[in-house]
Image (cartoon, rainbow, N blue to C red):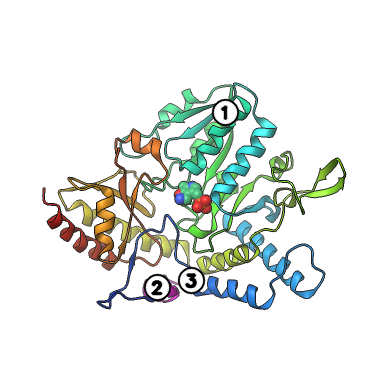
Amino acid sequence: MGKVFDVQAARNDFPALTQRDAKGQPIVYLDNAATTQKPQKVLDALMDFYTRYNANVHRGYYEWGQRATEAYENTRKRLANLIGAADPQEIIFTRGATEACNALAEIIGQRYFQPDDEIILSELEHHANQIPWQMQQTKRGVRVKGWHVKEDGELDLSQLDSLLTAKTKLLTVTHVSNVIGTVPPLREIIRRAHANGTLVVIDAAQALAHLPINVQTLDCDFLVGSGHKMYGPMGSGFFYGKRALLETLPPYHGGGTMMETVTIDSFTPAAIPARFEAGTPPVADIIGLGAAIDYLQQFSWKSLMAHEDQVIAYAEKTLSQFPRVHVVGHPPQRTAVLSFVIDGIHPHDVASLVSDHHIALRAGYHCCQPLMHRLQYPGGVVRASFGLYNTCEEVDRLAQALEKVFTVFPL
Ligand code: PMP
Protein backbone atom coordinates (compact mmCIF):
# COMPACT_ATOMS: atom_id res chain seq x y z
CA MET A 1 0.00 0.00 0.00
CA GLY A 2 1.20 3.51 -0.73
CA LYS A 3 2.38 6.38 1.37
CA VAL A 4 0.39 9.54 2.13
CA PHE A 5 0.19 11.79 -0.92
CA ASP A 6 2.59 14.73 -0.82
CA VAL A 7 1.96 16.99 -3.79
CA GLN A 8 5.15 19.02 -3.48
CA ALA A 9 7.27 15.90 -3.42
CA ALA A 10 5.33 14.56 -6.39
CA ARG A 11 5.96 17.75 -8.37
CA ASN A 12 9.69 17.24 -7.92
CA ASP A 13 9.37 13.90 -9.67
CA PHE A 14 8.45 15.68 -12.93
CA PRO A 15 11.40 17.50 -14.54
CA ALA A 16 9.14 19.51 -16.89
CA LEU A 17 7.41 21.08 -13.89
CA THR A 18 10.65 22.42 -12.43
CA GLN A 19 10.94 24.98 -15.25
CA ARG A 20 10.30 28.64 -14.42
CA ASP A 21 9.02 31.59 -16.46
CA ALA A 22 10.88 34.91 -16.74
CA LYS A 23 9.40 36.00 -13.41
CA GLY A 24 10.64 32.83 -11.77
CA GLN A 25 7.17 31.28 -11.59
CA PRO A 26 6.49 27.65 -12.49
CA ILE A 27 4.38 26.81 -15.54
CA VAL A 28 0.77 25.95 -14.62
CA TYR A 29 0.05 22.87 -16.68
CA LEU A 30 -3.70 22.23 -16.84
CA ASP A 31 -3.92 20.18 -20.04
CA ASN A 32 -3.57 16.76 -18.49
CA ALA A 33 -6.55 15.33 -20.33
CA ALA A 34 -4.59 15.88 -23.55
CA THR A 35 -1.42 14.38 -22.14
CA THR A 36 0.22 14.20 -18.74
CA GLN A 37 3.81 15.14 -17.88
CA LYS A 38 6.25 12.31 -17.35
CA PRO A 39 8.05 11.52 -14.09
CA GLN A 40 11.81 11.01 -14.06
CA LYS A 41 11.28 7.26 -13.53
CA VAL A 42 9.54 7.00 -16.89
CA LEU A 43 12.23 9.07 -18.63
CA ASP A 44 14.88 6.87 -17.01
CA ALA A 45 13.14 3.72 -18.20
CA LEU A 46 13.15 5.02 -21.79
CA MET A 47 16.79 6.08 -21.60
CA ASP A 48 17.77 2.83 -19.96
CA PHE A 49 16.16 0.79 -22.71
CA TYR A 50 17.72 2.75 -25.55
CA THR A 51 21.17 3.01 -24.00
CA ARG A 52 21.50 -0.43 -22.41
CA TYR A 53 19.35 -3.08 -24.03
CA ASN A 54 17.68 -1.75 -27.19
CA ALA A 55 16.52 -4.87 -29.03
CA ASN A 56 13.34 -6.19 -30.58
CA VAL A 57 11.00 -8.34 -28.51
CA HIS A 58 10.02 -11.99 -28.83
CA ARG A 59 12.76 -12.74 -31.35
CA GLY A 60 16.24 -12.29 -29.95
CA TYR A 61 17.95 -15.18 -28.23
CA TYR A 62 20.72 -12.89 -27.03
CA GLU A 63 20.66 -11.12 -23.68
CA TRP A 64 19.37 -7.74 -24.81
CA GLY A 65 16.50 -9.35 -26.69
CA GLN A 66 15.58 -11.37 -23.65
CA ARG A 67 15.76 -8.34 -21.35
CA ALA A 68 13.63 -6.29 -23.73
CA THR A 69 11.04 -9.08 -23.93
CA GLU A 70 11.00 -9.51 -20.18
CA ALA A 71 10.54 -5.78 -19.54
CA TYR A 72 7.82 -5.54 -22.22
CA GLU A 73 5.97 -8.52 -20.77
CA ASN A 74 6.37 -7.10 -17.29
CA THR A 75 4.29 -4.10 -18.33
CA ARG A 76 1.56 -6.52 -19.36
CA LYS A 77 1.61 -8.03 -15.87
CA ARG A 78 1.61 -4.60 -14.22
CA LEU A 79 -1.30 -3.43 -16.34
CA ALA A 80 -3.26 -6.59 -15.61
CA ASN A 81 -2.62 -5.97 -11.93
CA LEU A 82 -3.59 -2.28 -12.21
CA ILE A 83 -6.96 -3.00 -13.81
CA GLY A 84 -7.65 -6.26 -11.99
CA ALA A 85 -7.56 -8.46 -15.10
CA ALA A 86 -7.58 -12.18 -14.34
CA ASP A 87 -4.77 -12.91 -16.78
CA PRO A 88 -2.01 -10.69 -18.34
CA GLN A 89 -2.77 -12.34 -21.72
CA GLU A 90 -6.02 -10.36 -21.73
CA ILE A 91 -3.99 -7.16 -22.24
CA ILE A 92 -3.17 -6.21 -25.84
CA PHE A 93 -0.70 -3.39 -26.42
CA THR A 94 -1.44 -0.65 -28.93
CA ARG A 95 0.05 2.75 -29.70
CA GLY A 96 -2.72 4.60 -27.87
CA ALA A 97 -6.41 4.55 -27.04
CA THR A 98 -7.33 5.62 -30.57
CA GLU A 99 -5.61 2.58 -32.05
CA ALA A 100 -7.24 0.42 -29.38
CA CYS A 101 -10.77 1.66 -30.28
CA ASN A 102 -10.11 1.16 -34.00
CA ALA A 103 -8.77 -2.33 -33.37
CA LEU A 104 -11.76 -3.30 -31.24
CA ALA A 105 -14.30 -1.92 -33.70
CA GLU A 106 -12.67 -3.90 -36.49
CA ILE A 107 -12.21 -7.23 -34.72
CA ILE A 108 -15.54 -7.18 -32.90
CA GLY A 109 -17.19 -5.97 -36.10
CA GLN A 110 -15.68 -8.79 -38.19
CA ARG A 111 -16.80 -11.43 -35.75
CA TYR A 112 -20.09 -10.17 -34.35
CA PHE A 113 -21.73 -7.47 -36.51
CA GLN A 114 -24.46 -8.31 -39.01
CA PRO A 115 -26.38 -5.83 -41.19
CA ASP A 116 -29.07 -3.99 -39.16
CA ASP A 117 -27.38 -4.72 -35.84
CA GLU A 118 -27.25 -1.74 -33.52
CA ILE A 119 -24.47 -0.08 -31.56
CA ILE A 120 -25.16 2.36 -28.73
CA LEU A 121 -22.70 5.24 -28.42
CA SER A 122 -22.98 7.68 -25.57
CA GLU A 123 -22.85 11.36 -26.42
CA LEU A 124 -19.99 11.73 -23.96
CA GLU A 125 -17.64 9.81 -26.23
CA HIS A 126 -14.41 11.15 -27.63
CA HIS A 127 -14.21 10.99 -31.44
CA ALA A 128 -11.70 8.15 -30.95
CA ASN A 129 -14.54 6.08 -29.53
CA GLN A 130 -17.16 7.26 -32.00
CA ILE A 131 -15.70 7.28 -35.47
CA PRO A 132 -14.32 3.69 -35.50
CA TRP A 133 -17.85 2.44 -34.65
CA GLN A 134 -19.43 4.79 -37.18
CA MET A 135 -17.07 3.35 -39.79
CA GLN A 136 -18.61 -0.05 -39.09
CA GLN A 137 -21.89 1.35 -40.45
CA THR A 138 -20.50 1.56 -43.99
CA LYS A 139 -18.42 -1.59 -43.63
CA ARG A 140 -21.01 -3.91 -42.12
CA GLY A 141 -24.38 -2.20 -42.38
CA VAL A 142 -24.79 -1.74 -38.63
CA ARG A 143 -26.59 1.27 -37.18
CA VAL A 144 -25.18 3.61 -34.53
CA LYS A 145 -27.68 4.99 -32.01
CA GLY A 146 -26.79 7.96 -29.79
CA TRP A 147 -27.39 7.92 -26.04
CA HIS A 148 -28.21 11.43 -24.91
CA VAL A 149 -26.55 13.45 -22.23
CA LYS A 150 -28.61 15.63 -19.90
CA GLU A 151 -27.83 19.30 -19.29
CA ASP A 152 -25.87 18.49 -16.14
CA GLY A 153 -23.53 16.29 -18.18
CA GLU A 154 -24.94 12.97 -16.99
CA LEU A 155 -26.16 10.20 -19.22
CA ASP A 156 -29.92 9.75 -19.12
CA LEU A 157 -30.21 6.28 -17.55
CA SER A 158 -33.97 6.27 -18.04
CA GLN A 159 -33.31 6.15 -21.81
CA LEU A 160 -31.14 3.11 -21.68
CA ASP A 161 -33.78 0.41 -21.52
CA SER A 162 -35.60 1.73 -24.56
CA LEU A 163 -32.33 2.09 -26.47
CA LEU A 164 -31.39 -1.53 -25.84
CA THR A 165 -33.21 -3.76 -28.32
CA ALA A 166 -32.88 -7.33 -29.55
CA LYS A 167 -30.56 -5.94 -32.23
CA THR A 168 -28.13 -4.17 -29.89
CA LYS A 169 -24.82 -5.98 -30.26
CA LEU A 170 -22.64 -3.47 -28.46
CA LEU A 171 -22.72 -0.48 -26.16
CA THR A 172 -19.73 1.76 -25.59
CA VAL A 173 -19.30 4.41 -22.94
CA THR A 174 -16.51 6.40 -21.39
CA HIS A 175 -15.32 5.90 -17.82
CA VAL A 176 -14.56 9.62 -17.41
CA SER A 177 -15.70 12.29 -19.87
CA ASN A 178 -12.76 14.27 -21.28
CA VAL A 179 -14.91 17.43 -21.38
CA ILE A 180 -17.07 17.35 -18.25
CA GLY A 181 -15.33 14.85 -16.00
CA THR A 182 -18.58 12.88 -15.66
CA VAL A 183 -18.20 9.33 -14.31
CA PRO A 184 -21.21 7.33 -15.54
CA PRO A 185 -22.64 4.54 -13.32
CA LEU A 186 -20.79 1.86 -15.23
CA ARG A 187 -21.75 -1.15 -13.17
CA GLU A 188 -25.44 -0.47 -13.63
CA ILE A 189 -24.99 0.28 -17.33
CA ILE A 190 -23.01 -2.92 -17.87
CA ARG A 191 -25.53 -4.95 -15.89
CA ARG A 192 -28.42 -3.71 -18.03
CA ALA A 193 -26.48 -4.20 -21.27
CA HIS A 194 -25.52 -7.74 -20.35
CA ALA A 195 -29.09 -8.57 -19.37
CA ASN A 196 -29.87 -7.70 -22.99
CA GLY A 197 -27.01 -9.86 -24.36
CA THR A 198 -25.08 -6.73 -25.40
CA LEU A 199 -21.27 -6.48 -25.30
CA VAL A 200 -19.77 -3.48 -23.49
CA VAL A 201 -16.61 -1.51 -24.34
CA ILE A 202 -15.37 1.01 -21.77
CA ASP A 203 -13.11 3.90 -22.77
CA ALA A 204 -10.90 4.36 -19.71
CA ALA A 205 -8.41 6.76 -21.36
CA GLN A 206 -9.31 9.55 -18.92
CA ALA A 207 -9.85 7.34 -15.90
CA LEU A 208 -6.75 5.24 -15.41
CA ALA A 209 -4.62 7.99 -13.84
CA HIS A 210 -7.36 9.14 -11.50
CA LEU A 211 -9.31 6.26 -10.02
CA PRO A 212 -9.01 2.55 -9.34
CA ILE A 213 -10.46 0.23 -11.96
CA ASN A 214 -11.28 -3.43 -11.65
CA VAL A 215 -12.46 -4.97 -14.89
CA GLN A 216 -13.71 -8.08 -13.10
CA THR A 217 -15.84 -6.11 -10.67
CA LEU A 218 -17.09 -3.92 -13.50
CA ASP A 219 -17.61 -7.04 -15.63
CA CYS A 220 -16.95 -5.03 -18.81
CA ASP A 221 -16.13 -7.11 -21.88
CA PHE A 222 -13.48 -4.76 -23.23
CA LEU A 223 -11.71 -1.65 -21.97
CA VAL A 224 -9.27 0.71 -23.67
CA GLY A 225 -6.53 2.88 -22.16
CA SER A 226 -3.92 5.41 -23.15
CA GLY A 227 -0.40 5.35 -21.65
CA HIS A 228 0.42 8.99 -22.24
CA LYS A 229 -2.56 10.15 -20.17
CA MET A 230 -1.34 8.16 -17.16
CA TYR A 231 2.18 9.60 -16.91
CA GLY A 232 3.54 7.15 -19.46
CA PRO A 233 5.10 7.74 -22.88
CA MET A 234 3.23 8.81 -26.01
CA GLY A 235 2.85 5.85 -28.34
CA SER A 236 1.71 3.47 -25.60
CA GLY A 237 -1.82 2.21 -25.07
CA PHE A 238 -3.77 -1.00 -24.74
CA PHE A 239 -7.03 -2.76 -24.76
CA TYR A 240 -8.31 -5.38 -22.37
CA GLY A 241 -10.73 -8.10 -23.35
CA LYS A 242 -12.17 -11.08 -21.52
CA ARG A 243 -10.08 -14.06 -22.52
CA ALA A 244 -13.05 -16.13 -23.71
CA LEU A 245 -14.08 -13.29 -26.03
CA LEU A 246 -10.62 -12.37 -27.30
CA GLU A 247 -10.09 -15.97 -28.28
CA THR A 248 -13.08 -15.79 -30.64
CA LEU A 249 -11.81 -12.66 -32.42
CA PRO A 250 -9.79 -12.51 -35.64
CA PRO A 251 -6.56 -10.52 -36.06
CA TYR A 252 -6.85 -7.07 -37.63
CA HIS A 253 -3.24 -6.40 -38.66
CA GLY A 254 -1.15 -8.96 -40.47
CA GLY A 255 2.60 -9.34 -40.09
CA GLY A 256 5.23 -10.85 -37.86
CA THR A 257 4.31 -12.22 -34.42
CA MET A 258 0.55 -12.46 -35.03
CA MET A 259 0.78 -15.78 -36.93
CA GLU A 260 1.40 -19.38 -35.97
CA THR A 261 2.18 -20.81 -39.40
CA VAL A 262 2.33 -19.23 -42.85
CA THR A 263 2.22 -20.79 -46.34
CA ILE A 264 2.44 -18.82 -49.57
CA ASP A 265 -1.33 -18.33 -49.67
CA SER A 266 -2.52 -18.70 -46.08
CA PHE A 267 -1.72 -18.27 -42.42
CA THR A 268 -3.01 -19.44 -39.08
CA PRO A 269 -3.30 -16.80 -36.37
CA ALA A 270 -1.25 -16.96 -33.19
CA ALA A 271 -2.84 -17.28 -29.75
CA ILE A 272 -3.69 -14.14 -27.76
CA PRO A 273 -2.15 -11.65 -27.10
CA ALA A 274 0.33 -12.06 -30.02
CA ARG A 275 -2.58 -12.39 -32.46
CA PHE A 276 -3.31 -8.68 -32.07
CA GLU A 277 0.28 -7.38 -31.87
CA ALA A 278 1.60 -7.63 -35.42
CA GLY A 279 5.01 -6.20 -36.22
CA THR A 280 7.42 -4.31 -33.99
CA PRO A 281 5.51 -2.79 -31.08
CA PRO A 282 6.52 0.49 -29.40
CA VAL A 283 8.81 -1.46 -27.07
CA ALA A 284 10.46 1.45 -25.24
CA ASP A 285 7.12 3.19 -24.74
CA ILE A 286 5.48 0.08 -23.34
CA ILE A 287 8.41 -0.40 -20.97
CA GLY A 288 8.06 3.27 -20.01
CA LEU A 289 4.37 2.63 -19.37
CA GLY A 290 5.39 -0.08 -16.90
CA ALA A 291 7.47 2.51 -15.06
CA ALA A 292 4.49 4.89 -15.07
CA ILE A 293 2.29 2.22 -13.51
CA ASP A 294 4.92 1.62 -10.83
CA TYR A 295 5.01 5.35 -10.24
CA LEU A 296 1.23 5.58 -9.88
CA GLN A 297 0.98 2.53 -7.68
CA GLN A 298 3.35 3.91 -5.06
CA PHE A 299 0.45 6.16 -3.97
CA SER A 300 -2.72 4.94 -2.35
CA TRP A 301 -5.77 5.68 -4.49
CA LYS A 302 -7.47 7.07 -1.43
CA SER A 303 -4.88 9.77 -0.81
CA LEU A 304 -4.40 10.55 -4.50
CA MET A 305 -8.12 10.90 -5.13
CA ALA A 306 -8.58 12.98 -1.99
CA HIS A 307 -5.95 15.38 -3.28
CA GLU A 308 -7.32 15.59 -6.82
CA ASP A 309 -10.91 15.94 -5.57
CA GLN A 310 -9.86 18.78 -3.32
CA VAL A 311 -8.15 20.65 -6.19
CA ILE A 312 -11.01 20.18 -8.62
CA ALA A 313 -13.64 21.19 -6.05
CA TYR A 314 -11.56 24.28 -5.29
CA ALA A 315 -11.29 25.05 -9.00
CA GLU A 316 -15.06 24.73 -9.48
CA LYS A 317 -15.75 26.97 -6.49
CA THR A 318 -13.14 29.55 -7.52
CA LEU A 319 -14.25 29.82 -11.13
CA SER A 320 -17.93 29.88 -10.20
CA GLN A 321 -17.31 33.05 -8.18
CA PHE A 322 -16.86 34.97 -11.42
CA PRO A 323 -20.32 35.96 -12.69
CA ARG A 324 -19.06 35.77 -16.29
CA VAL A 325 -17.78 32.21 -15.95
CA HIS A 326 -20.12 29.26 -16.54
CA VAL A 327 -18.93 25.80 -15.64
CA VAL A 328 -20.04 23.13 -18.12
CA GLY A 329 -22.17 20.41 -16.54
CA HIS A 330 -22.69 19.55 -12.90
CA PRO A 331 -22.32 15.79 -12.65
CA PRO A 332 -22.63 14.23 -9.18
CA GLN A 333 -19.12 12.84 -9.55
CA ARG A 334 -16.58 14.91 -11.47
CA THR A 335 -13.11 13.56 -12.05
CA ALA A 336 -10.06 15.54 -13.17
CA VAL A 337 -11.75 17.74 -15.79
CA LEU A 338 -13.47 21.12 -15.54
CA SER A 339 -14.67 22.95 -18.62
CA PHE A 340 -16.15 26.43 -18.76
CA VAL A 341 -17.18 29.28 -20.98
CA ILE A 342 -16.91 33.00 -20.33
CA ASP A 343 -19.55 35.53 -21.41
CA GLY A 344 -18.24 37.74 -24.20
CA ILE A 345 -14.94 35.94 -24.80
CA HIS A 346 -14.33 33.16 -27.30
CA PRO A 347 -12.79 30.01 -25.73
CA HIS A 348 -9.77 30.26 -28.03
CA ASP A 349 -9.11 33.82 -26.84
CA VAL A 350 -9.33 32.71 -23.20
CA ALA A 351 -6.79 29.92 -23.69
CA SER A 352 -4.48 32.16 -25.68
CA LEU A 353 -4.62 35.07 -23.18
CA VAL A 354 -3.99 32.91 -20.11
CA SER A 355 -1.10 31.35 -21.99
CA ASP A 356 0.58 34.79 -21.74
CA HIS A 357 0.59 34.08 -17.99
CA HIS A 358 2.22 30.67 -18.57
CA ILE A 359 -0.95 28.74 -17.92
CA ALA A 360 -1.71 25.83 -20.23
CA LEU A 361 -5.43 25.32 -20.91
CA ARG A 362 -7.12 23.84 -23.91
CA ALA A 363 -10.02 25.32 -25.91
CA GLY A 364 -12.28 23.92 -28.60
CA TYR A 365 -14.48 20.88 -29.12
CA HIS A 366 -12.08 18.48 -27.40
CA CYS A 367 -12.87 15.84 -30.01
CA CYS A 368 -16.47 15.75 -28.78
CA GLN A 369 -18.53 17.56 -31.40
CA PRO A 370 -21.81 15.69 -30.72
CA LEU A 371 -21.53 16.62 -27.02
CA MET A 372 -20.81 20.26 -27.83
CA HIS A 373 -23.87 20.39 -30.08
CA ARG A 374 -26.05 18.68 -27.48
CA LEU A 375 -25.01 21.11 -24.76
CA GLN A 376 -25.18 24.02 -27.22
CA TYR A 377 -21.62 25.27 -27.17
CA PRO A 378 -21.11 25.89 -30.89
CA GLY A 379 -17.79 27.67 -30.29
CA GLY A 380 -16.52 24.95 -27.97
CA VAL A 381 -15.43 25.36 -24.35
CA VAL A 382 -12.28 26.05 -22.34
CA ARG A 383 -10.95 23.04 -20.46
CA ALA A 384 -8.79 22.85 -17.36
CA SER A 385 -7.75 19.28 -16.67
CA PHE A 386 -5.82 18.16 -13.65
CA GLY A 387 -3.14 15.69 -12.73
CA LEU A 388 -1.76 14.52 -9.42
CA TYR A 389 0.79 17.36 -9.36
CA ASN A 390 -1.69 20.24 -9.64
CA THR A 391 -2.41 22.43 -6.62
CA CYS A 392 -4.94 24.94 -5.30
CA GLU A 393 -2.25 27.64 -5.68
CA GLU A 394 -2.24 26.93 -9.40
CA VAL A 395 -6.00 27.40 -9.46
CA ASP A 396 -5.43 30.79 -7.81
CA ARG A 397 -2.98 31.69 -10.55
CA LEU A 398 -5.58 30.74 -13.13
CA ALA A 399 -8.14 32.94 -11.35
CA GLN A 400 -5.71 35.89 -11.30
CA ALA A 401 -4.98 35.43 -15.01
CA LEU A 402 -8.72 35.31 -15.78
CA GLU A 403 -9.24 38.59 -13.93
CA LYS A 404 -6.71 40.16 -16.28
CA VAL A 405 -8.46 38.61 -19.27
CA PHE A 406 -11.75 40.25 -18.14
CA THR A 407 -10.08 43.66 -18.32
CA VAL A 408 -8.97 42.97 -21.92
CA PHE A 409 -12.53 41.92 -22.85
CA PRO A 410 -14.89 44.01 -20.68
CA LEU A 411 -18.55 43.11 -21.03
N1 PMP B 1 -10.69 8.55 -25.37
C1 PMP B 1 -10.71 9.64 -24.60
C2 PMP B 1 -11.80 9.82 -23.58
C3 PMP B 1 -9.72 10.60 -24.74
O1 PMP B 1 -9.76 11.70 -23.98
C4 PMP B 1 -8.70 10.41 -25.71
C5 PMP B 1 -7.59 11.42 -25.92
N2 PMP B 1 -7.95 12.75 -25.78
C6 PMP B 1 -8.71 9.25 -26.47
C7 PMP B 1 -9.72 8.33 -26.27
C8 PMP B 1 -7.64 8.97 -27.47
O2 PMP B 1 -6.45 8.60 -26.81
P1 PMP B 1 -5.03 8.55 -27.50
O3 PMP B 1 -4.48 9.93 -27.45
O4 PMP B 1 -4.25 7.60 -26.64
O5 PMP B 1 -5.17 8.02 -28.88
Q: Residue furthest right?
A: 263
Residue picked out by circle 2: 11
The residue range painted magenta reads 2-17
Query: Quarter of the image holding residue 369?
Result: top left
Q: How many marks?
A: 3
Does residue 308 lie above or below 331 as drawn?
below
Where is mark 1, residue-wise?
137
Q: Which residue occupies 59% across, 54% down?
A: 95
Q: Residue 179, relative to residue 133: is it above or below?
A: below
Residue under label 3 = 39
Residue type at mark 3 is Pro
At label 2, the amino acid type is Arg
Identify whether 89 is placed above or below 20: above
Q: Give the Cα distance between marks 2 and 1.
A: 46 Å
Q: Secondary structure at mark 1?
A: helix
Residue 398 at x, y percent in the picture: 25, 62
Name the amino acid, label 1: Gln
Q: Can residue 169 be spotted in the picture?
A: no
Element type where label 3 sits in the image:
loop
Looking at the image, the residue that sits furthest to the front is 264
